[in-house]
Structures are given as C-alpha cells and as structure tokens.
Amino acid sequence: MIDFSRVQKELQECIKDIEASGIKVTPKGDNLSRLVGTIPGPIGTPYEGGTFQLDITLPDAYPFQPPKVQFTTKVWHPNISSQSGAICLDILKDQWSPALTLKTALLSVQALLSAPEPNDPQDAVVAQQYHRDYQTFVNTARYWTEAFAKTSSLGVEEKVKKLVEMGFPEPIVRSTLEAVGGDENLALEKLCSS
Amino acid sequence: MLNKDKQVDEGEAESSTSNLLPDWFYEIDNDVTDQQFDAESLELEKIPLIGDKEPLSVLEAEYKSGSPVWLEKIKFLEQKFNAIRRARGDGNCFYRCFMFSYFEHILETQDKAEVCRIKANVEDSRRILLGLGYADYTFEDLFELFLGQLECVLQGNASISHEELLVRSQYHRHSDSVVMFLRFVTAAEMRKRSEFFDPFVMGLTGSNVDQFCKSSVLPMAEESDHVHIIALSDALGVPIRVVYLDRSSSDNDGATVNHHDFVPGSGDSSASGWSSSSKVTEPFIVLLYRPGHYDILYPK
C-alpha cells in the first residue's frame, strides 16, 4: 500500500518550489501511483533549453522502495538509455532512502545531466562516443535536445525541409544538422563549404 | 538495468489492535489475490523479520560440521545464554534486533522512567532532523509510530501482549518503519556530532559524515558497522552489548567469546572479557554478531 498522504505532501512541496527548481511532478490520472515529472535541462550543458519529461511509477512499498523513473523525452546521455529512457542512477536503485523525495530524486536526475558518469554507463554506444569523440557526443546531445526536448522553437523537421528546399540532399542535411547540434545557420555554412 | 534489483514484495499480515498508528498501516491491498498473499506469507514464514525465541542448541546444530573453534565458542555461549532470537539477514538486522529487544524490555519491566527518558532523546533527534532540513513528512509518521509503539508496550488502555509485539515486528511495513526511524535517529546523531564521527567515517569509507549518512545509514538494507551502533546507542541513550562469534581466538585460554559494550555518552565504548567489573552498566540489549549479521541473545 503506497503512503498516499505522503505523496500528496510531496506534490504540494513541488508546487511551492516550482519557481526556484523548475521541477514539476503531476499525477497522470486519478491514481497517485502514476506521475509525470518535468525537469529543465541544466544551463551550460547540451541539454540547456530543453524540457525533459519523465514517467514515474510508485511501487506498493513506496517510500521504502524507490520510485521507478524513466525518461519519456529522448535523451542522448551515457547514463540514460537512448532507446528506452531507462536511467542508471544509484539513488533510484540500492541507494534510495525513504529520506529522499520525488523532488530530490528528480534533482539528482538533473544533476546527472550536468555530470555524466560514462564509466558506469546505461547506454554503451553513447558512453563509447563520450570517451572517443567528446565533441561529437556534445553535438549529438544538443541535436537531440533541439529535436526532442524543445516544444516551442522551430522543429528539426522544418529545418531539414528548409535546407532540402535550398537544394541539399536530405541524408546529408540530416547528418550535417546532427553534427552541428541542430544549429540551422552552422549547418548551412558547413553544407556550403563542403 | 533499472529494474534488475526489484525486491520481492512481502506478505503483510493484518493487524488491527490500535489506532495509534497511521491508517495506511492497516489497509490491506485489495489488488493482492489470495494466491499471491499465500505465496508471500509462505515466503515470510520461511525467514521471519524477527523469529521466535529458540534454545541456543540450534546454533550448535547449525555449526555441527563446522570448525571446532566455532563449536567450542558455542559451548562457551551456552554457559552464559539460554536463548537466541534470529532476525532476517536483509541488512536491517541490527535495527530490527535493537527495536525488538528494546520493546520487549519495556514490555517486561514496565519501566516508565526509561520510557520518559527515551522520549526526550527522540524529541532531540526530531529537532535535529528539522534543523538539518529534512522534509518533515519524510520522518514525522515514523517518529509517531515509534512513540505509539512505546505507549503500546506500557501497560494501560492500549497495551499489547508479547505475541502482538512479535506479530507487529514481523509485519513488514511496521517493522520497516521502525527500522527507518532508527536510521533517521542514527543519521541525526552522526551529523550533529560530525567532528566526532568524521574520523571514524574517513577510516571506513574515505568520505565524510554527510556522504556516509546518504550512502550507508539512510538507505534501507545498508548494513550496520560499529560506527552506526555507537551513534544509535548515544542518540537514544541505550547501552548495547555485542557478543562476537567469529574465528578469532584468544591467546591465553583457547575458545573464549569476546563482547563489546557500547555505553552511551562514554565517548568511547569498552571492550572486555567476562570480568565481574563490567557489570556496572549491564546493557539489557545483547546482540550476537556473526560476520555480517546480528541476532538477539538472552542471558541466563
């Protein structure tokens, strides 16, 4: 049996603090065991400007067992599966404590975005890229943020369409956009110079 | 990877005596089918969180084919103790043993002065946690539960029997809540006196008290070391004796069993043999330590 009165208090606390933390937790439906979390991408990282959504499921023994948390927004990060959004983070596993809360858990996920731990990877492909070609990793992560975590700005598909209309072949447009982290002008520059 | 260490849910026994506890302790999850419930109950029965009192001869049977040193040591224990009560080896055994032993002691002695004394210490811990910035809703219910349980073991309107105490201690949610209460109290003490505990922690893990509390005190299932015992004993003002059953052998007279008394406020705890001088503050909580595990011992 989930301690729902505690979950209620946790949600209220998040609302009180939303201006400062930017972290949001809202119920998915009537049932408080399924929640949606939102974290802003940390400033000064390839995730800056993105808004990331997470799916939160509370096990029956919550808070004695950790909440199950995974990204629903696609993220390019060594400790987050690029396929499923699963997160490799100790406090969501054996280092969870009932002294922690949903807000502190999401703050830790946000901190993980700022400080990847590529030696304890969830996504081996991303971790390998992080080690071997850091700049490409940063560009890809930025591109994924542009493509999947931004709702208001011009979508990637529109950028692709614009550049294709200028006469560049679509596969090259896509790979160039990805290489420069989704920046349309940089992509155009690169396409013109090659 | 995320789900690899999904824990096995435990059956939860129904308990319905006192409403001193939050409602959700007594709510039975209707989604659990009878079949599931039976399977979980069986699992629970196999290794209870806190077991029944058993004669010390069960230890002898356990080590029958073991090394002679162990058997000799167990013989020695049999002279001093007549029973053992086992706890499940899930990383919380120290706290579960402490909790049960303490409540059992209050139930048997009806020591009202002791209950008054410990309540003051519990209040101190609560204040420290608030001061440290822990969200009150993460620990308030656990503190209320502990204090409620304390009232229950004192004879009065809401008093409970020894059997009921055992049933509650075997009820997963209830037992885990008291374990978490004790973890909070331990962490509060360590952080309050971090200048005292920092060197211990540095030696153990190379980190500081804050980090140690996060990684080794507050998560459920993190095992307890000397440093946890010192902190809990100091925080609650309850002396604890730990009797060591391990491979070490004493230089002089062969198989003897060492113990260590954790005496609150002494700044240091005292190790000793079984000399009569150590009887000044005989701890009423006596735990048997075997590498990685604690059980409760009952002196003769």
Image: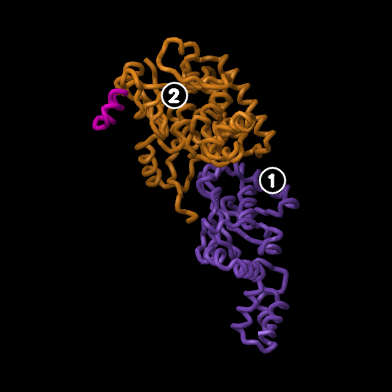
- Same chain check for tags 2 and 1: no
Q: Which chain is purple?
A: A
Mark 2 or 1: in front is 2
Q: Amino acid at mark 1?
A: Glu
Residue at the spot x=50%, y=63% of the render? A124
**Chain ID, mark 2:** B
Given contact means CB atoms under 8 Å apart, are the residues at marks 2 and 1 in contact?
no
Q: Position of residue B143 (x, y in %)?
A: 59, 30
- Magenta highlight range: B57-73
Question: Residue A77 shows which numbered tag?
Answer: none
* Residue toward you, B281 or B6: B281
Classify 10 Å Cα crowding around label 1: few (below 14), some (14-19), many (20 and above): some
Q: Is residue B107 visible?
A: no
Classify 10 Å Cα crowding around label 2: few (below 14), some (14-19), many (20 and above): many
Residue B246's quadrant in the figure? top left
Q: Which chain is orange?
A: B
Q: CA distance from mark 2 to mark 1?
A: 42 Å
**Chain ID, mark 1:** A
Q: Amino acid at mark 2?
A: Val
Q: Position of residue B298 (x, y in %)?
A: 39, 20
| Magenta span contains residue A8 | no
Q: Which residue was labeled with disc 1? A: A13
Q: Which residue was labeled with disc 2? A: B242
Side of A122 relative to A162 (left or right): left
Mark 2 lies on a secondary structure that is strand
Task: Looking at this view, name the residue that lies furthest to the right.
Answer: A19
Residue at the spot x=51%, y=15% of the render? B110
Side of B155 relative to B123 (left or right): left
The C terminus of chain A, quarter of image: bottom right
Q: Is residue B135 visible?
A: yes
Side of B155 relative to B42 (left or right): right
